[in-house]
Amino acid sequence: MVRDGEGLLELPLVSTSAGRSYKLVGSTFAITGPQNVTLTDMSADSVSQPLMAGTYSIQLNGDWHVERTDAPGVTVPVTLVSPNPMTFTLGEGEARPVRFLFKVPEDGTANVGIGVDTGGWISGTIQFEPAVGPFPGEPPDFFAEVRGKAVPFLISFESATVTRVSQSGYKRVEVLTSPITVQFGGEPAAVLRQVSSAFQGIPLYFSMEGGGPSSGRMNVLFLQSQSGSFTWELDVSRTLLNVDPEGYPLVTPFSFEQADTMIVRQYMGNASGVMNGTFAPR
């Protein structure tokens, strides 16, 4: 029962991907914020927890593993893609699902925590550059909370449309995703809550160029919030991609290192940094 001033955290533990169902087993969840709660009973397929409205951190703990529901007791090797811990904001009267994303080898993605995810993601860590200023007479630094910090992040989407284009001898792959979800880990930061909210639900477009007989390149990704108040540039263009026999880039996961990134708040400055992580285009 949800009382005045509370919202409801929803944490499903079963997900379906590529026609198979998976369950997260043996986990506990530590929730810290306006209330501190530890969830230990994970026997049901879904867990709900009333919480006072506010900003929280949730951490997946315990000797957890993932099983297929049609083969209980048999562990499926998975990789946790989401930041751990993650932050979320719960409004009064709001029902809020929390998203923990797992990669299941050869079976796609099991998104234990919010349903099915057969799309892709960009995940890793942003190391934001240290502060310079503000100097006397300048307004307060909008991004001061994240200066000099390393912040885990996840941009994920449930599906994507991939189109091959051959034009004037150049071959490229264009990808348009379903609405994205943006998440940050680590200590809650008000500025990052604004960033994740600004980009929530917009699609992501990017293209991959065939650069030659053996490798291609990724174009710079550019996100703009619907209001135009925030932009986010992710430059993974220096990463070389594999191509198929026809010369089109392969839409498969790849790792990136020391990739440049910049988040801009209109009229209020920007935060630059470098990213390390993994990009799974679909």
Image (cartoon, rainbow, N blue to C red):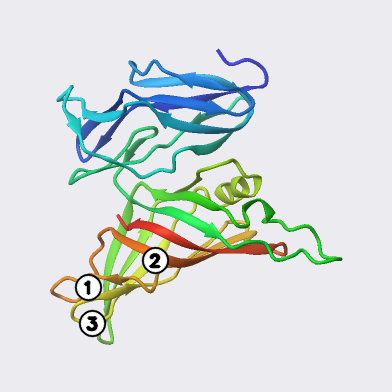
Q: Is residue 73 left or right of residue 158?
A: left
User: If you read the primary sequence from the N terminus, does the residue marked by circle 3 or circle 1 appear first?
Assistant: 3
Mark 2 surroundings: few (<14), some (14-19) or many (≥20) residues within 10 A: some
Q: Position of residue 144 (x, y in %)?
A: 69, 55
Q: Which residue is mark 1?
A: 248
Q: Is residue 280 left or right of residue 132?
A: left
**Disc 3 secondary structure class:** loop
Q: What residue is at 35 percent from the left and 58 percent from the top?
A: 279
The three-letter amino acid code for the residue at tag 1 is Tyr
101 vs 131, nearest the viewer: 131
Q: Position of residue 54 (x, y in %)?
A: 64, 31
Between the C-alphas of marks 1 and 2, the distance is 14 Å
Residue, far bottom: 168
Q: What residue is at 74 percent from the left and 65 percent from the top?
A: 133
Between the C-alphas of marks 2 and 3, the distance is 19 Å
Q: Is residue 259 left or right of residue 24?
A: right
Do the CB atoms of the residues marked 3 and 1 lie less than 8 Å apart?
A: no
User: If you read the primary sequence from the N terminus, does the residue marked by circle 1 or circle 2 appear first?
Assistant: 2
Q: Position of residue 229 (x, y in %)?
A: 65, 59
Q: Which residue is mark 3?
A: 212
The three-letter amino acid code for the residue at tag 3 is Gly
Judge whether residue 129 can be spotted in this image.
yes
